[in-house]
Amino acid sequence: MANSVLDTGWRHPRLTPSLAEAYRTVPVKPGAWWKKALAFAGPGYLVAVGYMDPGNWATDLAGGARFGYTLLTVILLSNLMAILLQGLAAKLGIVSGRDLAQACRDHYSKPVSFFLWVICEIAIAACDLAEVIGSAIALNLLFGIPLAWGIVITSLDVLIVLYMQHKGFRLLEGLVIALIATIAGCFLFEILISKPDTGAVFAGFIPSASILKDPDKLYIAIGILGATVMPHNLYLHSSVVQTRSYEETDAGKREAVKFAFIDSTVALSFALFINAAILIVAAATFHRAGATGVAEIQDAYRLLTPLLGVTGASAVFAFALLASGQNSTLTGTLAGQIVMEGFLNIRIRPWLRRLITRLIAIVPAALTAIFFGEHGTAQLLILSQVILSLQLSFAVFPLVMFTSDRLKMGEFVNPTWLKLLAYIVAVFIATLNAYLLVRVFAGWVG
């Protein structure tokens, strides 16, 4: 046993799989490549949800309303970084048989592992906060339900998650994909009626020096980056790829890594479309009309129909927001379970785990809605993104380090060019998030 541990670079030769109830439950049968691609398709969409949650909406809206199409290049850059990092997360899970949380517990000392768990739980609570507020805002806009009551109603989604988990993992993936398609359809409609300048849209994907020169532009750009790459998604992806029943051989793992990368890249392309669509609609509607101060979801909802002159434009926007909030909630539940089981090696009933996480999010959200109203919840949404950006590096650096360790990964270790690129991305994210935090706290103090 000692030799096997030394050979693998891990302290423990084998760990109990996370999400044990779904582990290896999706069969991968021999056949044409497209059949295998379909068998592996699914985990990437669970991950992509985190890249289009309500926390992204505020930054995308603000970027489009204030600066037109200029920041589309930032959305593209953040998506490319996400594709790289999620690919590494999938590879870690497939090759090592460990999710990122388990890998951290196996590699680091107990105090370090406990610290990583605590800040990850804080990040998940912050993410849940964004989902709660987003769903509550959508309920308020669509049905006139007061924000405080909307926040309470969102707690009932735990019943949906429990039902889906009992019915099978493929059904859960199917629901998530259906909701992503709903959001994409809503924004395709919004783009068509807002009639953006096609040339300006394409020009927006070309990097501009003005982003670095203008402090306000840079601030929003970093906000988009911080809201896009989500730390809990790295833990989630490294676990859910293990739901596939691939062969535990080098050839089987190689094939699984390839198809998992295809799955996440295609899924994240949908996330790119949706984030870009939010910014394009904001630019074509608000920036063009001179309403550059739109930064909150409620403002966007009120102005969409009158500015576009199309009945239902605002309702479609709010419906997409509701789908986004509910989708994020499904994957947030899984991420919370994976993180707790992985770091602490304890199992807790999913309904109880969800209830604890949801209460942590509901209490501050409800109190803010009651005492500070719409503007307060918008500020809380921004705070949740700041907390997420603060935690991100604590997930990215271990991921890059583990996948770049030949002892741990064997022939699947990151090649030199990929290792260099991954560390550049990790340092880049850490630097930008540090700048973002300084700006935010300076603004609060000032």
Image (tube, grey):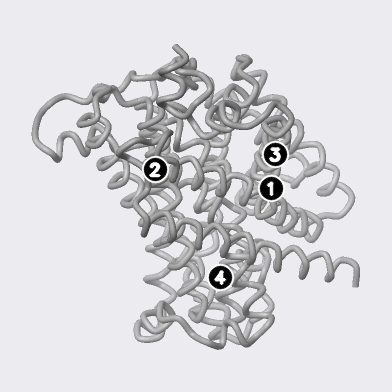
Residue under the point 67% across and 18% down = 352
How far across and how far down the image is residue 306, in percent? 57, 74
Q: Residues within 10 Å of mark 3 (few under 14, many from 20)?
A: many
Q: CA distance from mark 3 to mark 4?
A: 31 Å
Expressed as whole percent of the image width and height from the top left, the position of residue 386 reads: 71, 56
Give left or right: position of 305 versus 41: right
Marks 1 and 3 close (CB-CB < 8 Å): no
In this view, the mark in front (2 or 4): 2
Which-is-in-front pick, marks 1 and 4? Answer: 1
Q: Upstream in the sequence, badge 3 or badge 4?
A: 3
Residue picked out by circle 2: 45
Mark 1 touching mark 4, by CB under 8 A? no
Amino acid type of the residue that numbered disc 3 sits on in the rendered structure: Ala
CA–CA distance in space, label 1 to label 4: 20 Å
Q: Position of residue 87 (x, y in %)?
A: 38, 47
User: Quadrant location of residue 155?
Assistant: top right
Residue underneath mark 3: 125
Dots 2 and 1: beta carbons under 8 Å? no
Gap between marks 2 and 1 measured at Cα? 22 Å
Q: Is residue 197 above or below residue 117?
A: below
Between disc 2 and disc 4, whose residue precedes?
2
Of the numbered discs in the image, which one, if any, rests on residue 304?
4
In terms of sequence position, does the residue under pointer 2 or pointer 1 come before the other? 2
Which quadrant, please, contains the N terminus?
top left
Q: Quadrant of the C terminus?
A: bottom right
Where disc 4 sits, the SS reads: helix
Where does label 1 land, which residue?
133
| The label number, if any, that marks residue 283 in the structure image | none
Q: Is residue 245 above or below residue 81?
A: above
